Image: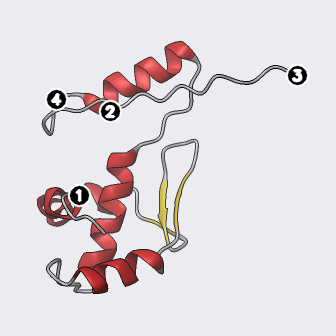
Amino acid sequence: MTAQKKIKVAIDGPAGSGKSTVAQAIASRLDLKYLDTGAMYRAITLKLLREKTELSDLDAVDKVVAQTELFLDDSKHVYLDGEDVTAEIRQRHVNDMVSPVSALSV
């Protein structure tokens, strides 16, 4: 039995620079799985907004995140606690808060 080589690729850059587009193209060309971490951050941001969680209260943030179920399917749908939030995570109220949420270290 041969060991499988695991490849991880991370692409960084400013919002709107095409990171997801490039990542999806690379994954497709190299026959790799694509994990949309941006959608994950957006879903967590939506949950924190819905729970009215203060970002300065890291214990509260940690508790909300620990009690959250997140699922991304192969058709690019995002499920937050069983609810399809694919469209909602792209709305402005979520977009405006993604950066502060992603900067947290919990």
> What residue sits right under mark 1 in the picture?
102
Q: Is residue 33 visible?
A: yes
The x, y position of residue 38, in whole percent, is 32, 47
> What residue sits right under mark 2 in the picture?
20
The x, y position of residue 57, in whole percent, is 19, 84
Task: Give the foreground label among 4 and 1.
Answer: 1
**Residue 44, image quadrant:** bottom left
Task: Give the foreground label among 1 and 3.
Answer: 3
Q: Secondary structure at mark 4?
A: loop
Badge number at residue 17: 4
Q: Which comes sooner in the sequence, label 1 or label 2? A: 2
> What residue sits right under mark 3 in the picture?
1
Q: Which comes sooner in the sequence, label 4 or label 1? A: 4
Mark 1 to mark 3 CA distance (whole Å)? 40 Å
The residue shown at (58%, 42%) is 74
- Which residue type does callout 2 highlight? Ser
